[in-house]
């Protein structure tokens, strides 16, 4: 049955069944929402948690007029050790694999779990797709590029300004990691090896695949606020760390001076790119795509300053006297941390294949995200911080 929707080449898009592994996470929850709201596709949602997609699983999920619940089925399973996985992949037309340990605080402190999660646990998914002739969209990371060539040049070298030395290209840039005792790179290395394995399955066994390299996608539902909906001692990614500091009126911690640079893309822009990949297999298969926003580059220090300003606007609270504080990476993340210096995605391939471009400025995406953070967490944080200490 055709859905009335057409792909980029004007061909009808038929409803499909998508096995989404890691559907209960940050990206998965937004992808599920998009697929249910705008397409006729059905989702087999696999995860160990479902808190972030609970609202989609309830019978009233699509609002008063339409229920989404009949197009999404949640399967609570751990892909490490569950024989139901192959059956689900066989039932689907396409598998999207998002499952991973992907918070930097884990890379150097839990390197074994990180490598198992990002390489070993992804192996059966690739194998079942390949053996059963099913298409796979696998989520890798911009971290596979590691450091830029430019960061090895002298600080005052004019070549540092030359994009050839820092723009990251899927088909040209090398992958530059630190030494083995910098266990930060356990994640990037595991992701790189699974990319190479998928690529080889494509070349040798005809696996239809697409690899996505997200460049710092951020927005509502990213990670957790420590002590509210995640462990008190947990260290999420920077958006949630800084949100937590702002909610608690604490200084934002700048690791090693906050000099590293990142480009941030709004989750809702990035999800548009994933939907294009899902619905345009002829254009997306056999490709690796950078998905990011090269126009939203800031240092981590600038991010902290902008988040402080935006939070002041959306919460109506004045900023604290010293809004940021410097902290060493050893103190913050422990031994073995290292960092990517700069991450600007080259957009040539995704532009050419899918015509996709990000739209949302950093200020605008922070405004909507911090409005969400304030609305969702401010009361809970206030309650938690005003609790009398047990005597
Ligand atoms: N958010 C980003 O900016 C970003 C950047 C680069 C790469 N990525 C990649 O995108 C993917 C999704 O990232 P995210 O930000 O949504 O992370 P996330 O942690 O919010 O989501 C991952 C989900 O996978 C689930 N999962 C992990 N191991 C599992 C297992 N063994 N069995 C079943 N479920 C399991 C988790 O419970 C979680 O819900 C990851 O592969 C990550 O490496 C994300
Ligand atoms: O409180 C904090 C948290 C983080 N940081 C810094 O902010 C920068 C960004 O940190 P994030 O936690 O968002 O993670 P990174 O950008 O380093 O890596 C991420 O990128 C791509 C994905 O694969 C993963 O989601 C993650 O590895 C780093 O330089 C980090 O050192 C702070 O200065 N203070």
Image (cartoon, grey):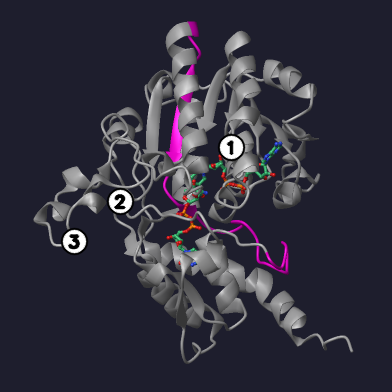
Task: Say if 96 sits above or below 9 in the image.
Answer: below
Mark 1 neighbour density, 10 Å: few (under 14) some (14–19) many (20 or more):
many
How far is the residue under mark 3 from the one under mark 1?
33 Å
Q: Is residue 69 visible?
A: yes
Dot 2 alpha-carbon crowd within 10 angstroms: few under 14, some 14 to 19, many 20 or more = some
- The correct choice, above or below, for 78 with respect to 293 in the image is above
What's the magenta bit mostly, secondary-structure-wise?
loop
Q: Which residue is mark 3?
A: 155
Please tell me how many numbered marks the rendered image carries: 3
**C-alpha span from label 2 to label 1:** 29 Å
Frontmost residue, 56 versus 238 = 238
CB-based contact (under 8 Å), mark 2 and mark 1: no
Where is 264 relative to 121, above or below? below
Whether the residue under disc 1 has CB within 8 Å of ligand 1:
no
Residue located beneath label 2 in the image = 294
> Percent from the top left, x then y, of residue 77?
78, 34
Q: Please name which of the two marks, 2 or 1, marks the residue nearer to the observer.
A: 1
Q: Is residue 205 left or right of residue 166?
A: right
Residue 170: where, in percent of width, then height? Answer: 32, 33
Q: Secondary structure at mark 1?
A: helix
Q: Residue furthest left?
A: 158
Q: Residue at x 45, y 51 (%)?
A: 216
Q: Look at the image and tell me whether residue 16 can be seen.
A: no
Tell me what residue is drawn at x 54 percent, y 87 percent: 317
| Marking on residue 115 | 1
Task: Tell me where residue 286 appears, x and y as whole percent.
Answer: 41, 20
The correct choice, above or below, for 46 with respect to 30 in the image is: above
Say whether residue 27 is magenta: no
Magenta residues?
Answer: 205-233
């Amino acid at each position: 049955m055709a859905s009335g929707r057409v792909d980029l080449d004007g061909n009808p898009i038929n409803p499909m069944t998508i096995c989404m592994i890691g559907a209960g996470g940050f990206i998965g929850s937004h992808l599920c929402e998009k697929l249910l709201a705008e397409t006729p596709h059905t989702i087999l949602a696999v995860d160990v948690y479902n808190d972030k997609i609970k609202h989609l699983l309830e019978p009233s999920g699509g609002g008063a007029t339409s229920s989404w619940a009949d197009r999404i089925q949640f399967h609570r399973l751990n892909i490490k050790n569950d024989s139901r996985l192959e059956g689900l992949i066989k039932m689907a037309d396409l598998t999207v694999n998002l499952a991973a340990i992907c918070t930097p605080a884990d890379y150097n402190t839990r390197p074994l779990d990180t490598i198992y999660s990002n390489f070993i646990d992804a192996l059966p998914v690739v194998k079942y797709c390949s053996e059963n002739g099913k298409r796979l969209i696998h989520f890798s990371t911009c971290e596979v590029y590691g450091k830029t060539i430019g960061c090895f040049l002298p600080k005052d070298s004019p070549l540092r300004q030359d994009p050839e030395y820092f723009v990251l290209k899927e088909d040209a840039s090398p992958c530059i990691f630190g030494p083995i005792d910098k266990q930060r790179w356990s994640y990037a290395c595991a992701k790189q090896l699974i990319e190479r394995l998928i690529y080889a399955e494509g070349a040798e066994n005809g696996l239809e695949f697409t690899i996505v390299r997200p460049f710092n996608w951020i927005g509502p539902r990213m990670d957790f606020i420590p002590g509210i909906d995640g462990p008190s001692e947990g260290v999420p990614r920077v958006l949630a760390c800084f949100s937590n500091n702002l909610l608690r009126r604490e200084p934002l911690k700048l690791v090693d001076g906050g000099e590293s640079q990142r480009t941030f893309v709004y989750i809702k822009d990035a999800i548009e790119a994933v939907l294009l990949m899902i619905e345009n297999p002829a254009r997306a298969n056999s490709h690796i795509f950078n998905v990011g926003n090269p126009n939203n580059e800031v240092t981590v220090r600038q991010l902290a300053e902008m988040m402080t300003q935006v939070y002041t606007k959306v919460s109506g609270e004045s900023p604290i006297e010293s809004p940021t504080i410097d902290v060493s990476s050893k103190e913050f993340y422990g031994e073995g941390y290292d960092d990517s210096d700069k991450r600007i995605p080259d957009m040539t391939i995704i532009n050419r294949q899918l015509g996709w471009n990000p739209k949302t400025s950093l200020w605008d995406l922070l405004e909507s995200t911090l409005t969400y953070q304030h609305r969702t967490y401010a009361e809970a944080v206030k309650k938690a911080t005003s609790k009398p200490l047990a005597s």
